[in-house]
Image (cartoon, rainbow, N blue to C red):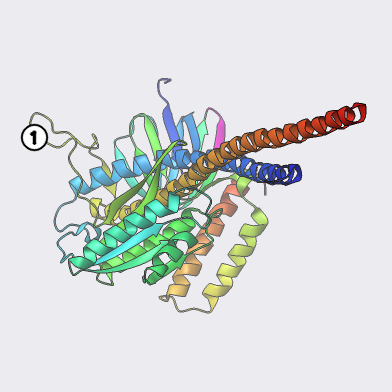
Amino acid sequence: MAEGKLLLEVVTPYRRLVSAEVDEVTAPGFRGEFGALPGHTPYLCQLAIGVLSYRAGSARYFLSIMGGYAEVGPERVTLLTEVAERAEDIVAERARSARRRAEERMAGRAQESVDFERAAAALRRALARLDVARQSGVS
Amino acid sequence: MPSLRDYRRRIRSVKNTQQITRAMKLVAASKVRRAQERIEGLRPYSGKMEELVNSLALRAEGTPHPLLNDDLKDDKILLLVVTSDKGLCGGYNAAIGRLALQFLRRREEQGKRTEVIIVGRKGRAFLARRGYAFKREFTEVYGKIDYRLAREIALLLMKGFLEEGFDEVHILTTEFFSILRQAPRLSRLLPLAPPVPDAVDPHGEPVAGGVDYIYEPSVMGVLSDILPRHITVQVYRALLDAEASEFGARMRAMDSATSNAAEMIRALTLRMNRVRQASITKEILEVVSGADALKG
């Protein structure tokens, strides 16, 4: 492996979605976004719903991920996630209508109810997808 | 004795059957390949997950996580049985059914209570005939087995273990080794087996997982989030294995059916030719003796 690079792997129950040498990874951590560069200290982090981005050379890539775990080491980053989508897998129109539905459902609910939590999670998923679509410039 | 026409009819019928079994074999062969790919696709995920769970569980201190709690009475048992919806796959369902029955009867003799969650119509029919009722049935799920279904079943099992007083949860499925080899496998899902330190360094420190991570939010936090997913992966694996095994079993069953049909056609053709020859010989004899009579 090339010196000063990270081996990034994104693994879902269906397949190994990404396996690439990258320079930098940014992921939505449990307590906020974190970045990893080559030589990072061993770190195991639960992930939130959000956008994973990574850079290889001058190219930047974005993926929406729905939770999971990141295992970070000095030479590699392994992401385990149940759902991960590349920009080209995302239908922006569907994500937009999901966002609308979630907002409507949240509007009429008490903050603490299960329905509210569910709608809020749906909203976060929709926003992550839209973010990826926007940043990759395909929406 | 059957006439020539009877033989012809019979041979045609066997040929038709053979065409069907051959087609079924080909379909099963292509499906088994796809199912195999899905198992392969899960492997990186399940392998990594297992690694994480092991290293986390070894580092966890204090009271064990509820899903690891094996300090229970052990007298109420939940069994998940995975069978197929369709038949024509040799002894596939019978093998699972036999094992399920054996498992349940032995536990009942020991005075334990058992309940069953069944996947597949064949298993449901088999156990229902023997007087078993089901806590939950999943039928017509093949062809749409996905992670989501596995999660639904896994949640059901975990709820049984954590809230409904089941002391053990077992899975009975057919493990897929290769196209030629599948075997029923019974395994305990819950409580999860405690991790074994797979290696110990000279100072007696466990080195499983190798690296000491910084954990976010915390060891217990990650562990309690990851264990349910780990269970889900086990269930998903059991479903994928069963699916691939069903196709493998069907492929072999239909392969032998096809060659049995070929053997039957061969035997029938032989007998048909014999009958035909006999009738020709008879006709010749008649002509010759007729001619002789005229000459006479």
Q: Give percent across and percent down for residue B203.
A: 7, 31
Residue A13 makes an appearance in the image: no
Q: Give percent across and percent down for residue A76.
A: 38, 32
Majority secondary structure in the magenta region:
strand
B229 w.r.t. A80: above or below: below
Which amino acid does the dot numbered 1 rest on? Gly
Could you tell me which quadrant the C terminus of chain B lies in? top right
Residue linked to disc 1: B204
Q: Nearer the viewer, residue B264 or B15?
A: B264
Q: Residue at x 52, y 73 (%)?
A: A106
Residue B211 left/right relative to A21: left
Quadrant in the rendering for residue B112: bottom left
- Is A59 covered by the magenta stretch? yes
- Is A58 covered by the magenta stretch? yes
B211 w.r.t. A103: above or below: above
Q: Residue at x 38, y 63 (%)?
A: B155
Work out which residue is located at the far top of the displayed protein and give it.
Answer: A2
Work out which residue is located at the far right of the displayed protein and give it.
Answer: B294
Residue A98 left/right relative to B107: right
Q: Magenta residues?
A: A57-61
Q: Residue at x 77, y 34 (%)?
A: B282
Q: Residue at x 15, y 52 (%)?
A: B61
Q: Nearer the viewer, residue B280 or A126?
A: B280
Quadrant in the rendering for residue B67: bottom left
Q: Give percent across and percent down for residue A124.
A: 50, 60
